[in-house]
Image: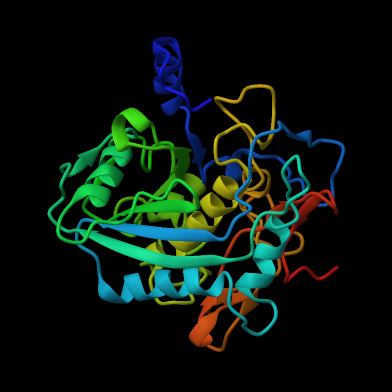
């Protein structure tokens, strides 16, 4: 699927790029019910493609100007994926993703390492990015001197994270993040990647829910007083805390469907429903239909469902569990 020597294949892949698997928070408000506890409605199938079974070397490309505290929060979440923390932990959450296997029976890895970072503070490809621009950004990060990121087709996974002032095609209008794989003609090799944008100023009600209300929900915005039960962000910023759940969503899906030919539901690989799409808006037992489910709140009213390194807490959406055949997270009450 990623051999671009044939011109028709290149044309096909370029057309597929506009359908790269996307995370759309709005979908959760359009669903009459969620799939928690339901097995007959979901036709998740394996399509014989690879999963990320080898230890993952994760590379972050910070595009634009970033707050150092926000960067530290995101790094700590990445560290938490394969580090011990009190139950229910981020690593416990990742164990559901590890249940997915390839055709040899090999599970998705539990070994994720932050192996490099690139700081594109010059906005090398401008302040408005198309979906395909993400591949050019990866190319820049892996060729810039003096300290490029390695282009690692063996076990590399690239996260392009855009700052608050960067406009991205379909961001806020339709998606909060997406994943796909690079084309050798652009990047020089085939590597899986994901993009996620910081939504704290552009569209918190869409991409930082439940730390901000959607504009069309009829709820008061977070800044108003009285009668507003908005959930507070566990790390102090709605944009970055909401972004972490989207990062988790995309990491789950790129690991289980890196070349868009492994785990997904539906007959159309250009628009797959993947293992995190099935559980949009579900963070705890009973979640769905705009209700996050039963999650924890600390003494300050900050909502969370997972523990991480350095005493961090995170609110991360659940994932479809192929064994239980329902949405599941380690904070489940049943």
Residue 105 position within the rendered picture, expressed as x and y whole percent measured from the top left: 78, 47
In the drawing, does residue 234 fall left or right of residue 240?
right
Residue at image point 17% right, 44% down: 127
Residue 224 position within the rendered picture, expressed as x and y whole percent measured from the top left: 38, 67
> In the picture, which quadrant includes the C terminus?
bottom right
In the drawing, does residue 90 fall left or right of residue 114?
right
In this rendering, is residue 112 above or below 281?
below
- The answer to which of 99 and 330 lies nearer the viewer is 99
In this rendering, is residue 91 above or below 42?
below
Q: Write down the quadrant of residue 49 in the picture.
A: top right
Q: Write down the quadrant of residue 237 in the picture.
A: bottom left
Q: Write down the quadrant of residue 172 in the picture.
A: top left
In this rendering, is residue 327 above or below 30?
below
State the residue lying farthest toward the top: 8
Residue 129 position within the rendered picture, expressed as x and y whole percent measured from the top left: 25, 38
- The answer to which of 306 and 81 lies nearer the viewer is 81
Counting labels gives 0
Q: Is residue 209 visible?
A: no
Residue at image point 72% right, 71% down: 331
Q: Is residue 58 visible?
A: yes
Residue at image point 72% right, 43% down: 102
Residue 5 position within the rendered picture, expressed as x and y whole percent measured from the top left: 40, 18
Q: Coloring scheme of the render?
A: rainbow
């Amino acid at each position: 699927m990623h051999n671009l020597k044939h011109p028709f294949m290149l044309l096909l892949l370029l057309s597929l790029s506009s359908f790269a698997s996307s995370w759309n928070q709005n979908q959760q408000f359009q669903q009459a019910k969620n799939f928690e506890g339901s097995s007959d409605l979901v036709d998740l199938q394996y399509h014989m493609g690879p999963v990320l079974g080898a230890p993952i070397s994760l590379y972050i490309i910070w595009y634009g100007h970033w707050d150092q505290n926000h960067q530290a929060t995101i790094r700590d979440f990445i560290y938490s994926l394969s580090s011990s923390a009190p139950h229910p932990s981020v690593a416990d959450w990742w164990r559901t993703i590890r249940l997915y296997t390839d055709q040899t029976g090999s599970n998705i890895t539990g070994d994720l390492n932050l192996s490099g970072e690139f700081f594109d503070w010059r906005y090398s490809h401008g302040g408005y990015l198309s979906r395909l621009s993400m591949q050019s950004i990866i190319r820049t990060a892996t060729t810039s001197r003096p300290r490029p990121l390695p282009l690692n087709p063996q076990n590399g996974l690239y996260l392009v994270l855009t700052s608050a002032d960067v406009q991205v095609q379909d961001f806020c209008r339709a998606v909060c993040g997406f994943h796909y794989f690079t084309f050798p003609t652009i990047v020089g090799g085939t590597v899986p990647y994901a993009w996620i944008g910081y939504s704290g100023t552009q569209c918190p009600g869409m991409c930082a829910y439940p730390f901000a209300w959607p504009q069309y929900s009829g709820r008061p915005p977070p800044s108003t007083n009285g009668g507003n039960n908005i959930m507070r962000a566990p790390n102090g910023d709605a944009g970055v805390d909401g972004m972490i759940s989207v990062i988790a969503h995309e990491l789950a899906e790129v690991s289980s469907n890196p070349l868009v030919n492994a785990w997904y539901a539906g007959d159309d690989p250009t628009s797959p429903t993947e293992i995190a799409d099935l559980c949009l808006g579900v963070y705890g037992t009973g979640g769905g239909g705009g209700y996050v489910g039963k999650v924890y709140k600390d003494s300050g009213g900050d909502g969370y469902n997972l523990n991480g390194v350095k005493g961090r807490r995170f609110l991360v959406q659940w994932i479809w569990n192929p064994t239980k055949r329902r949405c599941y997270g380690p904070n489940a009450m049943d």
